[in-house]
Image: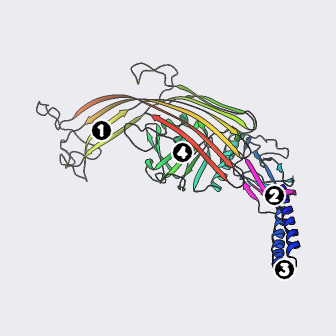
């Protein structure tokens, strides 16, 4: 406002000089016309600049005390519109001075309108507290019913998913991490298997890899707050991410991006999985959540130690717990601390056949079942993870977050095999006048005496085998994220480091 006034005074002084020196000339007349045009444009600009202000604030979901991201805030009667950020904050500039009406809309919550007085050249503030008429009364008190807990969980997940997907840059699926209830031992893969377009690959009782849209798992990248997480594969070099070393306890929601956008690496042609960490600035007030539980298999229901699968007896009913603590220290700074420890025992039983299509008279149409293997593979799984994250709101337009997390994984496999080896030549038996010697599901083994030159040969045998294996994995990561969201520019930058060992 002050600069505009100075410029106008200078233009006025210049016009007086022009009038005094060239009042009777054509050049002076032309300059006067030009000056009138310039000053005519300058005056409305000065009035426009002095007749506007700004409005900022936050949008809160009263039901879960979380701030609402991607809520639409508009100034009625104008084209001014903006979306709240992930912390529920909004900022509108260029708002006409005077009394205006703000309108906010968020999927799953009732729309709300409020009157705000805007002062020219100043910033006004107004916060919204949204509710749902189906769940809250006029005084915004929660109405309890028989299914309050499950209803709130489902409601929160649906609202976040719909808002995130509606305003996403590409096609993606978003779900709150508690949308499907408790996840077995915290494995992220156990959560992802419920999402459309995602298939998982089990190794024993654990989800190890996932694929999106039918592409191989090595074409699916995994991120933490938009930054890649490394993974060391089991036994061989590879690019696929193994979810044994990731814990869902550290995530507020999970995003599956099915169509890559220009800012993503080209190797994620199948899709990308992004784990969005919990943030203290997303919540109003402190909150401590915890679970303690026992994990058991229906084949082992004794609380005491029982034999196997190691040399010594062991407990099969095992404890576990997890927690997350959100602490907004003040309006501009807060911490989130999470932790998980789980132990699980699984009985595993499977059988498989090996068919021969070439020897002993076997054909494609009538193969010889050469081996039948029964396997008992009990398995112990232990997982620990923890994270700490700090969020700092430097100003209305700038935020910094710092997070470190660590995940540890250990599995013990105790496989015991019983093998029925038929050999490559089966005996012939006559049944009902038809000669039958073997088929795809049965075979009669040849008999005879073993010799030094043919110790096993075509004769049948029964063998037993055991194998024991321990698998260890550790992944730790840390990142720093900076966000600037101004009226003209928006900047998002970060630094990330991750290490994984198996």
The answer for how far apart the CA atoms under marks 1 and 4 are is 35 Å
427 on left or right of 349: left
* Numbered badge on residue 95: 2
Specify which label sits upstream in the sequence, 3 or 2. Answer: 3
Specify which label sits upstream in the sequence, 3 or 4. Answer: 3
Query: Which residue corresponds to mark 3?
Result: 25
218 on left or right of 54: left
Specify which label sits upstream in the sequence, 3 or 1. Answer: 3
Residue 77 place in picture, x, y as percent: 82, 63
Residue 324 place in picture, x, y as percent: 64, 32
Residue 228 place in picture, x, y as percent: 52, 44
Specify which label sits upstream in the sequence, 2 or 4. Answer: 2
Is the residue 92 above or below the residue 441 in the image? below
Q: Nearer the viewer, residue 35 or 75?
A: 35
| Mark closer to the observer (3, 4) | 3
Q: Nearer the viewer, residue 101 or 354?
A: 101
Give the main secondary structure of the magenta stretch.
strand
Query: Which residue corresponds to mark 1?
Result: 372
**Local SS, label 1:** strand
Query: Which residue corresponds to mark 4?
Result: 192
The answer for how far apart the CA atoms under marks 2 and 4 are is 43 Å
Q: Magenta stretch: give its range.
A: 73-100
């Amino acid at each position: 406002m002050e600069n505009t006034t100075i410029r106008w005074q200078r233009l006025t002084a210049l016009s007086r000089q022009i009038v005094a020196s060239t009042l009777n000339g054509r050049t002076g007349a032309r300059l006067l016309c030009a000056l009138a045009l310039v000053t005519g444009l300058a005056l409305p600009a000065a009035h426009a600049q002095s007749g506007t202000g700004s409005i900022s604030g936050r949008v809160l979901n009263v039901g879960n005390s979380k701030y609402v991201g991607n809520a639409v805030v508009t100034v009625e009667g104008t084209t001014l519109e903006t979306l709240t950020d992930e912390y529920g904050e909004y900022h509108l500039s260029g708002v006409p001075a005077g009394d205006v009406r703000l309108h906010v809309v968020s999927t799953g919550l009732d729309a709300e309108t409020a009157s705000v007085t805007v002062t020219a050249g100043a910033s006004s503030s107004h916060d919204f507290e949204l509710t749902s008429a189906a769940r809250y009364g006029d005084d915004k008190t929660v109405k309890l019913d028989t299914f309050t807990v499950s209803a709130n969980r489902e409601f929160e997940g649906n609202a976040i998913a719909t808002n995130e997907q509606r305003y996403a840059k590409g096609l993606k699926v978003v779900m709150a991490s508690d949308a499907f209830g408790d996840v077995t031992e915290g494995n992220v893969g156990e959560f992802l298997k419920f999402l459309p377009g995602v298939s998982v690959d089990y190794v024993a009782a654990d989800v190890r890899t996932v694929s999106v849209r039918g592409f191989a798992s090595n074409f699916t990248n995994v991120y933490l707050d938009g930054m890649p997480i490394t993974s060391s594969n089991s036994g061989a070099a590879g690019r696929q991410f193994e979810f044994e070393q990731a814990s869902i306890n550290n995530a507020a929601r999970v995003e599956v991006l099915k169509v890559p956008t220009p800012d993503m690496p080209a190797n994620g042609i199948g899709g990308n999985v992004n784990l969005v960490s919990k943030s203290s600035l997303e919540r109003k007030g402190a909150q401590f959540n915890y679970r303690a539980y026992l994990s058991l298999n229906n084949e082992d229901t004794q609380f005491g130690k029982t034999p196997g699968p190691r040399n010594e007896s062991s407990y099969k009913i095992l404890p576990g717990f997890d927690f997350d603590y959100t602490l907004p220290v003040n309006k501009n700074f807060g911490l989130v601390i999470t932790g998980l420890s789980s132990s699980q025992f699984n009985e595993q039983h499977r059988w498989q056949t090996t068919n021969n299509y070439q020897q002993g008279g076997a054909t494609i149409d009538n193969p010889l079942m050469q081996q039948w293997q029964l396997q008992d593979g009990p398995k112990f799984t232990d997982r620990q993870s923890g994270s700490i994250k700090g969020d700092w709101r430097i100003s209305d337009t700038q935020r910094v977050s710092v997070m470190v997390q660590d995940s540890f994984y250990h599995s013990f496999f105790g496989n015991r095999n019983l093998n029925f080896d038929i050999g490559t030549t089966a005996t012939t038996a006559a049944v009902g006048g038809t000669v039958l010697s073997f088929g795809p599901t049965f075979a009669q083994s040849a008999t005879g005496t073993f010799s030094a030159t043919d110790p096993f040969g075509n004769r049948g045998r029964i063998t037993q085998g055991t194998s024991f294996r321990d698998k260890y994995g550790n992944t730790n990561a840390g990142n720093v994220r900076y966000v600037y969201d101004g009226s003209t520019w928006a900047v998002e930058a970060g630094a990330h480091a991750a290490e994984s060992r198996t």
